Amino acid sequence: MTDSQIWLIIAIAFLILEIITPGFVLANFAVGAIGAAVAAFFGATMVVQLIVFAILCFISFVTIRPILKKTLIKDDKPAFLTGAGAIVGRTTIVTERIPNDLISGRVQIDGDSWQAISEDANPIEVGERVSVVRVDSTIVVVKRL
């Protein structure tokens, strides 16, 4: 078996292992192994093959891995929000007058009644449409639309 065939087997093994493990780490080693296989095919010595392997692994880690992580793995936020975070940004109607930012009124969100205070300290009357700005414990902070 030639050096280039051994490097190709190593590259295939790294690609198979990459499928099992997350993070796009082993695929970078596969890129280096493919480069070393090409170097071996053209008759490079083992030292040159290892240098090509190391350089291509490094370049792959620096360039390809961040691009793959950014496009294929979305770490920004979960696909759907749950709990109190799910109501931020929602539009609802005031069911009990909100006098100011210190005294709470009430809003109805998905059948649940929430204590609500005004974000800008201005009173909000019953029936007005508001948007949920944030959730502080069990009180929602709303702003008039």
Image (tube, grey):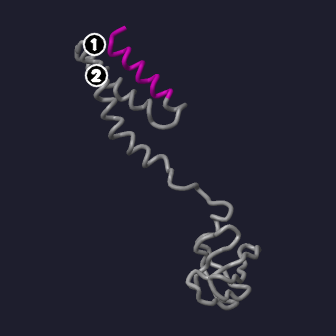
**Where does the N terminus fall, quadrant-wise?**
top left
The reply to whether dot 2 and dot 1 touch (C-beta < 8 Å) is no
* Residue range highlighted in magenta: 1-17
Residue nearest the observer in this picture, 1 or 124: 124
Q: Label 2: how many residues lie within 10 Å, few (<14), some (14-19) or many (20+)?
A: some
Residue name at image x 73 percent, y 75 percent: 114
Residue 33: horizontal and vertical position, in percent? 35, 23
**Where does the C terminus fall, quadrant-wise?**
bottom right
- Identify the mark at residue 38; answer none if there is no mark: 2
Q: Label 1: how many residues lie within 10 Å, few (<14), some (14-19) or many (20+)?
A: few
Residue 143: horizontal and vertical position, in percent? 58, 81
Tell me which amino acid carries mark 2. Val
Magenta portion: prevailing SS class: helix
Residue name at image x 40 percent, y 23 percent: 11
Decide: is 136 above or below 129. Answer: above
Q: Mark 1 falls on what kind of element?
A: helix
Residue name at image x 68 percent, y 86 percent: 98
Q: Inspect the magenta stretch and tell me whether residue 12 lies in it.
A: yes
Q: Is residue 128 left or right of residue 33?
A: right
Q: Mark 2 falls on what kind of element?
A: helix
Quadrant of residue 28 in the image?
Answer: top left
The residue at the far top in this view is 1
Decide: is 55 above or below 24. Answer: above
- Identify the mark at residue 46; answer none if there is no mark: 1
